[in-house]
Image: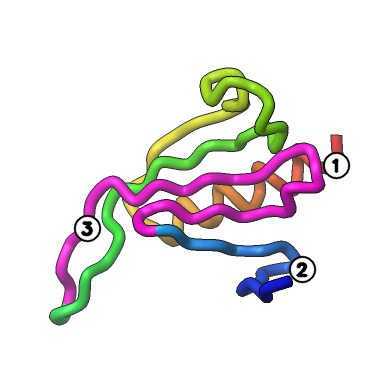
Amino acid sequence: MSEFLTYKDKPLVRSGDEIYYGDMSEPFVIRFEILSYKETDGKKIADKVNIQLLKSDIQLDTKDRIVKETTKDSMFDALDFGFVWLERALKE
């Protein structure tokens, strides 16, 4: 089994402009989609990020898996929202 980068003991996996956070064996995961970038000091920084709280049941249609969704103007804000959403959803 391959090792993934983790944050608070949950996998954080990037594929292109998508980042998934959470354990697929739990009921929910978070999906971050980087919609646009800006350049700061010669570095490409995520500018607009879509956040989705998803049911981890891949048998459901994609639209039926989305529990919450929003867009933020920075990766920092997106991560902050996503981590809180997932933590709350898993406690319920």
Q: In front here: 56 or 38?
A: 56
Give the x, y percent position of residue 1.
73, 71
Residue shown at the point (63%, 53%) measured from the top left: 83
Amino acid type at circle 3 is Tyr
Range of the magenta residues?
16-40
Residue 58 quadrant: top right
Amino acid type at circle 1 is Lys
Badge 2 marks a residue whose secondary structure is loop
- 19 sits to left or right of 12: left
Q: Residues within 10 Å of mark 1 (few under 14, many from 20)?
A: few
Residue shown at the point (61%, 55%) measured from the top left: 21
Pointer 1 residue: 91
Pointer 3 residue: 37
Residue 39 quadrant: bottom left
Q: Disc 2 vs disc 3: Cβ atoms closer than 8 Å?
A: no
Residue shown at the point (23%, 51%) measured from the top left: 36
Pointer 2 residue: 9
